[in-house]
Image (cartoon, grey):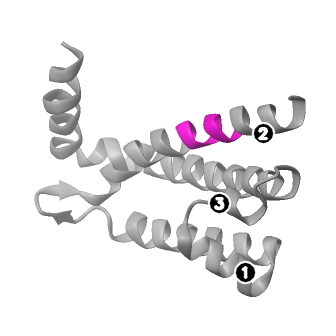
Amino acid sequence: MTKYIILYIIPGILLQRPEFLKKRGAGIMAIFIALQLADGILTYLGIIYSSLGINYEMNPFVTFLISKTGIAPGLFISKIISIITAGILYFYGYKKAYGIRLTACFYPLNIIMFCILIMHLLVLNTFLNG
C-alpha cells in the first residue's frame, strides 16, 4: 500500500494541482534553505570536532572548495550555490520538464536533507560522546 501511494498517488497530486505547489512552494523553499544552513553548520562541526577532518565531507566538490578556501568559506560557497540553484528551480519550477513540475523536486530533496541531518547528529554524537 505504501509503495502504491509513493509511486502513484503523490506524483499524481503534484502533477495535477499546480495551485497546491504555488500555495506551499514558498514554505517548501524556506524549509529547504533552513535544512541547507543546518547541514552547513553540522558539517562545519563535524570537520572541526571529528577525527576525520576534511574527510568528514563526502562531496568531492565541497572538499575541493574547503581545501582551496578554508572550512567556513568553502562550506559557505557550497551552500550559497545550492540555495541559488534551488532559487532558480523555484522561480522556473512551475513549468514542466519531462512531464514533472520542477517544484515537486523540493519534497524529496527536503526528505533527503532531513535524513542527512539525522546522520550528521548521529555521527557527531559518536565522536563527541564516545
* In the rendered image, the vertical position of residue 4 relative to residue 17, given as above or below: above
Residue 50: image location, x then y, percent: 82, 49
Q: Give the residue type at disc 3.
A: Glu
Of label 1 and label 2, which has the lower sequence position?
1
| Residue type highlighted by circle 1 | Ser
- Position of 94 relative to 35 (above/below): below
* Residue in the image at 71% along x and 58% along y: 40
Task: Give x and y (percent) for residue 22.
Answer: 37, 50
Local secondary structure at mark 1: helix
- Is residue 13 one of those drawn in magenta? no
Q: Residue at x 78, y 32 (%)?
A: 126
Q: Which mark is residue 124?
A: 2
Asked if 28 appears above or below 8 in the picture, the reply is: below
For mark 2, does the 10 Å Cα neighbourhood hold few (<14), some (14 to 19), or many (20 or more) residues? Answer: some
Gap between marks 1 and 3 measured at Cα:
11 Å
Res. 67 mark: 1
The stretch of residues the image draws in magenta is 114-120
Q: Secondary structure at mark 2?
A: helix
Where residue 37 appears, x then y in whole percent? 70, 56
Q: Are marks 1 and 2 in contact (CB under 8 Å)?
A: no
* Pick the front one: 53 or 42: 53
Asked whether the residues under the numbered discs 2 and 3 touch, taking CB atoms below 8 Å apart as contact, a structural biologist would say no
Q: CA distance from mark 2 to mark 3?
A: 13 Å
Q: Earlier in the sequence, mark 1 or mark 3?
A: 3
Q: Tag 3, which secondary structure?
A: loop
According to the picture, the residue beneath numbered tag 3 turns out to be: 57
Of the residues shown, which amino acid type is indicated by label 2? Leu
